[in-house]
Image (cartoon, rainbow, N blue to C red):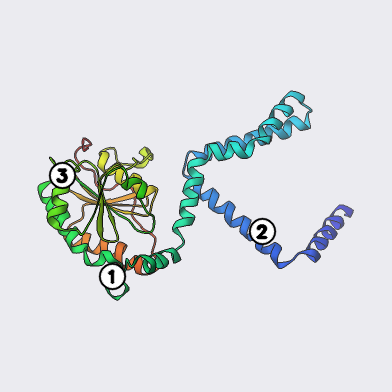
Amino acid sequence: MSTINQLIENFLAIMRTFRFKDLVDIVAIGVIIFYITKLVRETRAVQLVKGIFVLLILYGAANLFNFTMMTALLNRFFEFAVIVIFIVFQPEIRKFLEQIGRSNYTYKRIRSILTGSSGENGLPAISQYISIYVEAVMQLHESKTGALIVFERRTRLGDIADTGTIINATPSIMMIGNVFYNKAPLHDGAMIVRDGRVYAAGCILPLTHDNKNVDDNLGTRHRAAIGVSEVSDAVVVVVSEETGAVSIALNGAIKRNYNRDTLTRELNRLLVVEESKTPEKFSFRKGGKKEKSKSEQ
């Protein structure tokens, strides 16, 4: 009974000194832990977290039973634990920081003011060119010409654009068709669209590493589309060289088999409507109907 009374007294003593900023501090730490858990839950990093917990249990057991050598070894390990964590979790930390950066929608407004990248009535510059891109994609679809078009949004892709050739030209159906013509020097890479203009072509994109959740029948072009959508907020349009099917990749997910009307609606929603207001979450699921070959390049 005395133990319970002591616990109650300790709790009341803590509550008497508890301030509002302490509540904010606890909530902030809780939110950080929640998002870190959410970030690593569906990745290989969760196995590393389990490994760290095992080491902590071993460390506690070593101290409890006075295992001198194990305690000394684990002490050395935990002295450098922060550096080890940053090295081991580098991909997850980078992804976490990128997500934080993407959530700053004020940046979009400031950028449009400084660069003059808004079109008429405050709409993004891309709004006046969507019909051109859609028509070009439909022609590539009909001729089964492979294509990969990356529409930048808030995340700049200058490092990827530097792997190709800078064009910085006003788009036209003929120019887009010429870039992806299968005997043209730039046809194998991706086209980067910035503020509605064709900024670069022949660019090399990173491939997705999430092979477990990607359809085995998707070729290199589709995997590159998913890959760049994992590391940026870009909207990526893909035309299959094998079937001519049109797909869109966003946030590491892909949806396939668009036609002229659905492609126009989706690009307007993602590039015009959502760039003019707070974006909604992209709801595509990975996978979709399988294509017939995985030999695309």
In the image, residue 138 lies at what x, y percent? 14, 55
Few, some or many C-alpha atoms within 10 Å of disc 1 (few <14, some 14-19, many ≥20)?
some
What residue sits right under mark 1 in the picture?
Answer: 119
The circle on residue 34 is: none
Looking at the figure, which quarter contains the C terminus? Answer: top left
Pointer 3 with pointer 2, Cβ within 8 A: no
Q: Nearer the viewer, residue 214 or 95?
A: 95
Mark 3 vs mark 1, CA separation in Å: 35 Å
What residue sits right under mark 2 in the picture?
Answer: 26
In the image, residue 149 lies at what x, y percent? 25, 51
Callout 3 secondary element: loop
What residue is at 22 percent from the left and 63 percent from the top? 130
The answer, for residue 194, to whether it is visible in the render is yes
Q: Nearer the viewer, residue 150 or 116?
A: 116
**From the viewer's perspective, is 47 left or right of 251?**
right
What residue sits right under mark 3 in the picture?
Answer: 243
Mark 3 vs mark 2, CA separation in Å: 54 Å
Mark 2 vs mark 1, CA separation in Å: 44 Å
**From the viewer's perspective, is 295 left or right of 283?**
left
Few, some or many C-alpha atoms within 10 Å of disc 2 (few <14, some 14-19, many ≥20)?
few
Q: Nearer the viewer, residue 12 or 112?
A: 112
Q: Is residue 213 above or below residue 171?
A: above
Few, some or many C-alpha atoms within 10 Å of disc 3 (few <14, some 14-19, many ≥20)?
some
Q: Quadrant of residue 73?
A: top right
Mark 2 vs 1, N-terminal side = 2
